[in-house]
Image (cartoon, rainbow, N blue to C red):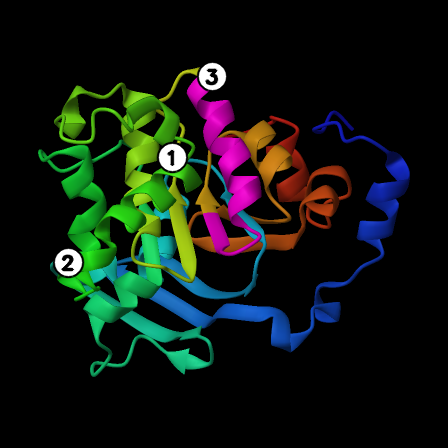
């Protein structure tokens, strides 16, 4: 079939023979169980059960309106900000249900950081953007210079901006702004990084930089990325979940999902027959 090409067929076959159940439960950092969500009377997520592996990249793919962005917003309770939202099911982070009403949402969003489709730097200096989160969470103020340099380096931005830290972040290019937002997210030491189409507004060079960073980040973080770009999912993700009309159609190792999908609907999507 006309799917995304991978380096060797032997690698594909090895992964195809690896069932999802073989994932060690100790490797699971985030899990949804029968998760459903409504906007008012409109049900947009239908009984989603998904396991996210620690220190790996998981991509959510699927056509527009399939519920991908809604799903990742469940992971840091961003949907709480929308009137009329109702959730059933559970979302377990390190074994704890984050949908419970007594969860500290501010602490949760420190633990589960997020990058959005369009970069959203604060209208402050580059320095103040990075230190904003640490200040909110009461980090040691004597470490701010170290925090700024460390996280700008992590975001591959230090060499470009270290002489202009007091400049307004809005003066940066779009690609630089997105990497600044990544540095800002990293500055509060999250466990999981959510990325909602982080490259959709970027040029190819900036996209490549973000993709390279994603590969580096998984050494210390768990990354969940929503993308409409199937080639991008194939390049960066260890696991891929295909969603359609609010349902999780298929989940597995990325090579398996693209090269040997178990569902006809998945095959049609990755081959470009719809979506």
Give the magenta range.
205-224
Camera-side residue: 35 or 23? 23
Residue 147 on image: x %, y %: 30, 50
Q: Which residue is mark 3?
A: 205
Label at residue 91:
none
Residue 131 on image: x %, y %: 19, 49
Q: Please say if 264 is above or below 82.
A: above
In the structure shown, which secondary structural element does the residue marked by tag 3 occupy? Answer: helix
Which residue is at a point 41% across and 69% down the rendered structure image?
35
Residue 247 on image: x %, y %: 48, 55
* Mark toward the start of the polypeptide (2 vs 3): 2
* Mark toward the start of the polypeptide (1 vs 3): 1
Classify 10 Å Cα crowding around label 2: few (below 14), some (14-19), many (20 and above).
some
Residue 196 on image: x %, y %: 37, 42
- Is residue 126 left or right of 23 when viewed as pictured? left
Classify 10 Å Cα crowding around label 1: few (below 14), some (14-19), many (20 and above).
many
- Is the magenta region chiefly helix, strand or loop? helix
Q: Examine the rendering and report whether any part of residue 40 can be seen.
A: no
Mark toward the viewer: 1 or 3:
3
Whole-Å distance between the Cαs marked 1 and 3? Answer: 13 Å
Mark toward the viewer: 2 or 1:
2
Q: Please say if 30 is above or below 39.
A: below
Q: Verify whether residue 219 appears in magenta.
A: yes
Camera-side residue: 76 or 164? 164
Q: Examine the rendering and report whether any part of residue 193 can be seen.
A: yes
Total number of numbered discs in the rendering: 3
Q: Mark 2–mark 1 contact, CB under 8 Å?
A: no
- Is residue 215 left or right of 204 when viewed as pictured? right
Q: Which residue is mark 1?
A: 198
Classify 10 Å Cα crowding around label 3: few (below 14), some (14-19), many (20 and above).
few
Camera-side residue: 267 or 229? 229
């Amino acid at each position: 079939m006309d799917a995304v090409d991978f380096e060797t067929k032997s690698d594909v076959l090895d992964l195809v023979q690896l069932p999802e159940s073989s994932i060690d439960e100790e490797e699971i950092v985030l899990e949804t169980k029968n998760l459903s969500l409504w906007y008012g009377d409109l049900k947009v997520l239908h009984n989603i059960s998904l396991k996210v592996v620690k220190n790996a990249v998981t991509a959510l793919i699927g056509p527009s309106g399939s519920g991908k962005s809604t799903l990742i917003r469940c992971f840091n309770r961003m949907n709480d900000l929308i009137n009329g939202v109702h959730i059933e099911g559970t979302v377990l982070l390190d074994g704890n249900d984050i949908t419970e009403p007594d969860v500290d949402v501010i602490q949760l969003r420190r633990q589960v950081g997020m990058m959005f489709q369009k970069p959203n730097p604060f209208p402050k200096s580059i320095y103040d953007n990075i230190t904003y989160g640490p200040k909110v969470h009461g980090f040691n103020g004597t470490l701010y210079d170290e925090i700024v340099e460390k996280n700008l380096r992590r975001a591959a931005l230090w060499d470009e901006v270290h002489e202009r830290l007091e400049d307004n972040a809005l003066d940066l290019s779009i690609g630089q702004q997105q990497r600044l937002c990544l540095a800002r997210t990293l500055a509060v030491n999250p466990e999981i990084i959510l990325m909602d189409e982080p490259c959709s507004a970027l040029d190819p060079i900036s996209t490549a930089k973000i993709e390279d960073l994603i590969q580096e980040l998984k050494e210390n973080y768990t990354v969940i990325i929503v993308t409409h770009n199937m080639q991008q999912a194939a390049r960066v993700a260890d696991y891929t979940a295909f969603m359609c009309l609010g349902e999780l159609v298929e989940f597995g190792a990325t090579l398996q999902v693209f090269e040997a999908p178990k569902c006809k609907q998945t095959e049609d999507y990755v081959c470009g027959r719809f979506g």
